[in-house]
Image: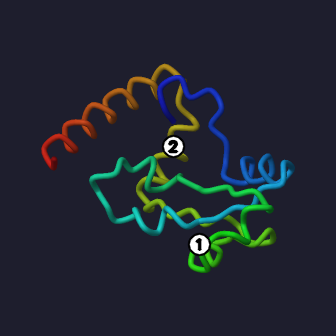
Amino acid sequence: MGVQHINEQPYQYWREKFEQRGFVLLDWIRPQIQQQHNVAFWYRYNLLLFVSHAEFERLPADVQSSRVAPDQAVPDVSPFAYRMRRAFTKWLPVSAVDRIVHLAHRLERRRLRREA
C-alpha cells in the first residue's frame, strides 16, 4: 500500500526468503519504536531484523531473546484501524490506492514537521 510498491508481501514471505539463506528473524526493533510517533508508522509496524545464524550467538542476550521461533507467527503490531485500512485497500484499483497513499504521505510529512 505505497506508491509504486510492486513487491509488498506478508511478513511470512520475507521470513521464508531469509530463512532459506540462513538468517533468523528477530523482532527487537519494533517494540522499541512502536510508541515513538516521530518515527513513521510504516517503520514502527514493519521493521524486522534478520541476522545470520553464524552471527546470532554473538548478539547480546536481550537481542537474542527477541527471536521469533520458526513455528511462531510474526506478530502484527499495527493498530486495528491500520489493519482494516490495509484490508480495505486490497479491493481498490491501484490508481485509487496510489492517490490515497500520496495524500496520506503528505499528511504524515506535515505531522512530522509540526512535531519536530
Using the image, determine if residue 16 lies above or below residue 89: below
- Left-right relation of 42 to 54: left
Residue 112 image offset from top left, x and y in percent:
22, 44
Count of numbered circles in the view: 2
Residue 55 image offset from top left, x and y in percent:
73, 62
Q: Quadrant of residue 109?
A: top left
Amino acid type indicated by mark 2: Phe
Q: Nearer the viewer, residue 86 or 68?
A: 68
Within 10 Å of the Cα at label 2, are there few (<14), some (14-19), or many (20+) other Cα atoms?
few
Amino acid type indicated by mark 1: Val
Question: Helix, strand, or loop for circle 2?
Answer: helix
Q: How far apart are the alpha carbons under marks 1 and 2?
A: 35 Å
From the image, state whether disc 1 or disc 2 is nearer to you. Answer: 1
Residue at the (45%, 47%) spot, across then down: 42
Judged from this view, the residue extending furthest toward the right is 20
Residue located beneath label 2 in the image: 88
Residue at the (67%, 55%) spot, across then down: 50
Using the image, determine if residue 105 lies above or below residue 26: above
Residue at the (61%, 56%) spot, across then down: 49
Judged from this view, the residue extending furthest toward the left is 114
Question: Helix, strand, or loop for circle 1?
Answer: helix
Residue 22 marker: none
Residue at the (45%, 24%) spot, across then down: 98
Residue located beneath label 1 in the image: 63
Q: Quadrant of residue 91?
A: top right
| Label whose residue precedes the other's in the sequence (1 or 2) | 1
Q: Are marks 1 and 2 in contact (CB under 8 Å)?
A: no
